[in-house]
Image (spheres, rainbow, N blue to C red):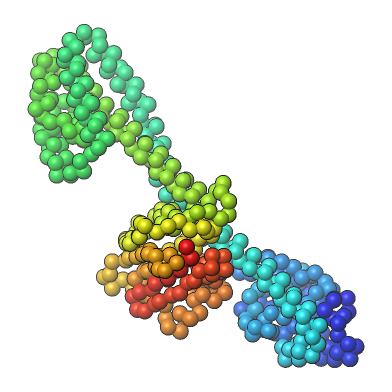
């Protein structure tokens, strides 16, 4: 045979393979094995081409190909795991199959053949690990990008509304200022208006958030404006109340205009209300812009853009960045309790990979809470940090239904997941375990019972 592994076998062993191997011929499009099937044996591909694919949200995604000549199937025979991929012939393909027992007999009969097989196993596992890491990162990015788009939409829409509304309002204010200026009103009276306006701007910038006081002011202003004879008084009440204008202030300011029969009779009141409206628009627009800036900064910090792979990392910053990006899921009745030890030192770590850990754990906690029974409980995620000897200890606990005892020991296994098809990445928490253990020299354990699941991460300082 042309494949190096088989060149180490003596002629009698090659003849033995020929006697025992089952000849298979596949047509183009024919499936050899499907993802989730039990091991069918060891395959030797002599001609043709086979595509290797894996299910993602119910769709087969190609992840590689077997070009002739090739062999495959050894990992599943050696580990007795189910087949993790689907193999489909691209063209007419000719191959042979050794059953599991015969392949194990062959491996153990020739030391050189065994070494070649295990070298191939190592290469394929490294390739699979690289694929898993890339896929997990894309899955995390997909989860967060959907939420980020939702979170950005609200402040962006508010900013657009402000920019549309502020232009005609500013033009109307300019017209009012021009009309008032033509009256040659004395400077002292103008100063009174400006003082009330400036105090209102300050009140809008730093609101008291007292709805009862606001409601009382609006009721009093409504009565005063209607008594004064202001048209569409209801439109002016809210901005005047927000600027903490009282009826006493209006009595003072409007005394000289009460008997004026021109449009100047209520121009000052409208000017004041419109000025407060414009200030509120600007204030809301700034809030929206700052929210957009915060979200973008959180995403940049989350991904550790423009930084080296390893950095001095503040654990709390990474967790908070991740929580901000999950705000779209947390706002629906899930309370986050934080118990942070603010004296914890920074650690040298792969920041973006640790954020991937927090993404997986927080996303799983949210799903566990949403899928569990309500029972009148307050949905809650609790995050605790502290120092334990030369490690930082991070606990992430949820009050969902808990992990069944028969599944708890498997929760960190590769590809194991309790989520149905189409939810999550389909890769389980093995990526989390490898980032913590292999990349950072830490550990992860899970404690779970009815109504409580807690993941405990230890990272060396």
**Residue at the image point whose x is 56% and y is 46% from the top:** 306
**Residue at the image point whose x is 9% and y is 27% from the top:** 248
The image quarter in which residue 320 lies: bottom left
**Residue at the image point whose x is 29% and y is 13% from the top:** 178
**Residue at the image point whose x is 77% and y is 70% from the top:** 66
- The x and y percentages for residue 211 are 18, 44
Instruction: In the rendered view, tell whether residue 282 sits above or below residue 459.
Output: above
Q: Nearer the viewer, residue 118 or 334?
A: 118
Instruction: In the rendered view, tell whether residue 375 sits above or below residue 112.
Output: above
- Specify whether 74 is left or right of 272: right
- The x and y percentages for residue 19 are 85, 91
- The x and y percentages for residue 413 are 54, 76
Q: Nearer the viewer, residue 123 or 234?
A: 123
Q: Is residue 8 visible?
A: yes
Q: Nearer the viewer, residue 241 or 187?
A: 187
Outermost front residue: 389
- Specify whether 342 is left or right of 265: right
Q: Is residue 421 visible?
A: no
């Amino acid at each position: 045979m042309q494949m190096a592994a088989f060149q180490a076998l003596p002629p009698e062993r090659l003849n033995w393979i020929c006697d025992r191997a089952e000849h298979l011929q596949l047509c183009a499009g024919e499936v050899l094995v499907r993802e989730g099937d039990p091991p069918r044996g060891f395959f030797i591909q002599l001609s043709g081409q086979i595509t290797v694919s894996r299910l993602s949200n119910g769709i087969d995604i190609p992840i590689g190909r077997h070009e002739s000549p090739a062999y495959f199937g050894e990992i599943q025979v050696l580990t007795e795991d189910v087949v993790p991929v689907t193999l489909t012939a691209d063209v007419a393909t000719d191959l042979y199959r050794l059953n599991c027992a015969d392949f194990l007999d062959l491996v153990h009969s020739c030391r050189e053949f065994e070494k070649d097989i295990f070298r191939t196993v190592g290469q394929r596992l490294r390739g699979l690990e690289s694929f898993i890491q890339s896929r997990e990162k894309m899955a995390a990015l997909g989860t967060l990008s959907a939420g980020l788009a939702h979170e950005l939409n609200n402040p962006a829409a508010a900013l657009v509304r402000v920019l549309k509304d502020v232009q005609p309002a500013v033009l109307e204010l300019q017209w009012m200022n021009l009309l008032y200026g033509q009256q040659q009103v004395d400077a002292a009276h103008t100063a009174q208006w400006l003082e009330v306006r400036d105090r209102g701007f300050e009140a809008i910038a730093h609101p008291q958030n007292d709805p009862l006081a606001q409601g009382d002011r609006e009721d009093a202003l409504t009565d005063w404006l209607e008594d004064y004879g202001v048209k569409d008084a209801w439109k002016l009440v809210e901005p005047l109340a927000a600027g903490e204008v009282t009826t006493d202030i209006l009595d003072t300011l409007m005394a000289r205009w009460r008997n004026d029969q021109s449009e100047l009779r209520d121009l000052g009141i409208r000017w004041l209300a419109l000025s407060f409206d414009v200030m509120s628009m600007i204030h809301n627009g700034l809030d929206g812009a700052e929210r957009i800036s915060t979200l973008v900064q959180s995403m940049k910090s989350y991904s550790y853009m423009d930084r080296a792979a390893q950095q001095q990392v503040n654990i709390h910053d990474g967790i908070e960045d991740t929580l901000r990006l999950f705000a779209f899921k947390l706002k629906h009745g899930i309370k986050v309790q934080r118990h942070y030890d603010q004296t914890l030192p920074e650690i040298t770590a792969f920041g973006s990979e640790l954020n991937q850990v927090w993404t997986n754990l927080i996303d799983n906690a949210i799903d566990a809470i949403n899928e569990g029974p309500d029972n009148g409980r307050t949905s809650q995620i609790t995050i605790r940090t502290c120092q334990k000897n030369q490690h930082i200890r991070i606990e992430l606990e949820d009050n969902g239904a808990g992990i069944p005892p028969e599944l708890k020991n498997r929760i960190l296994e590769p590809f194991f997941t309790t989520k149905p098809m189409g939810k999550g990445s389909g890769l389980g928490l093995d990526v989390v375990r490898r980032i913590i253990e292999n990349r950072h020299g830490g550990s992860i354990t899970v404690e779970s019972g009815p109504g409580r699941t807690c993941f405990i991460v230890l990272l060396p300082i």
